[in-house]
Amino acid sequence: AQSVTQPDIHITVSEGASLELRCNYSYGATPYLFWYVQSPGQGLQLLLKYFSGDTLVQGIKGFEAEFKRSQSSFNLRKPSVHWSDAAEYFCAVDTTSGTYKYIFGTGTRLKVLA
Amino acid sequence: DAMVIQNPRYQVTQFGKPVTLSCSQTLNHNVMYWYQQKSSQAPKLLFHYYDKDFNNEADTPDNFQSRRPNTSFCFLDIRSPGLGDAAMYLCATSRDAGETQYFGPGTRLLVL
């Protein structure tokens, strides 16, 4: 069955430190891949997406993600975290089969220490 | 700016009292989705519309219904809310299948 795994439920980093959030998926082909961020009490905001082409994708707010087919991964990175990045981050996969359905990971909650 | 709007942002209802949540979009997208998100969980798809075609997820309770009177608006009706229906309800849109979904800010539902 198709699935998305975000192994880290909580991550704490210091402001200014680098960040990597992990996402692994299980799917027979290359899906469409997304990262969303959700601040408390808010909806989901798209950070970046991968459909095809260059495997290093740039997004908003200084985030980037790298698609690695061999590892079935789409990890999110940021070189220097700001306090305002504290939020919940969701990885999502669209299996491109026309099912209209995202498969979401369970999310990673990021805490930033001043 | 083109966007997805949800009203109200917060809704309090009583156990068993019907409630309707609203979503509108200025993106002119074909597909509109309703998700339920409980605390510290991923969003769970309830159903979606492709244009006027309604698609219900197999595990969505009958208590949840939806209407899409035109391209811009979509409503979520909860016929008899239970305490377990307290959650954030997210509306999203996409131009077509396999395309990026854009989310509204959500409606937080509290059931007393």
Image (cartoon, coloured by chain):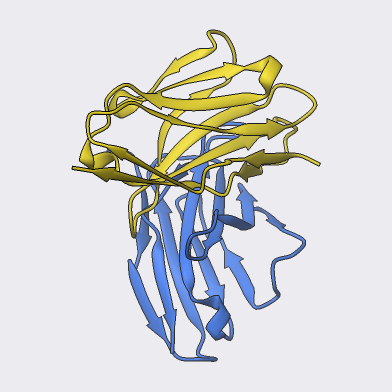
Chain colours: A yellow, B blue
Image quarter hosting the N terminus of chain A: top right
Q: Position of residue B18 (x, y in %)?
A: 51, 85
Q: From the top left corner, tell me how far across and down residue B54 is, in percent.
A: 68, 56
In the rendered view, would you say A96 is above or below B25?
above
Residue B106 lies, with reference to residue A112, above or below; the image says below
Q: Which quadrant of the view contains residue A84? A: top left
Q: Nearer the viewer, residue A53 or A25?
A: A25
The residue located at (76%, 39%) in the rendering is: A2
Q: Tell me where residue B50 appears, x and y as whole percent.
A: 63, 46
Q: How many marks?
A: 0
* Residue A42 visible to the viewer: yes
Q: Is residue A26 left or right of residue B38?
A: right
Camera-side residue of B46 and A114: A114
- Residue B3 picture location, percent across and down: 35, 43
* In-front residue for pair A40/B95: A40
Instruction: State the residue at coordinates (57%, 18%).
Output: A67
Q: Is residue A1 left or right of residue B11?
A: right
Q: Residue at x 62, y 42 (%)?
A: A102
Q: Is residue A4 above or below residue A28?
A: below
Residue that sits furthest to the top in the current view: A54
| Location of residue B96 by image quarter | top right
Is residue A93 shown left or right of residue A97?
left
Picture quarter with the C terminus of chain A: top left
Please say whether residue B81 is visible from this viewpoint. no
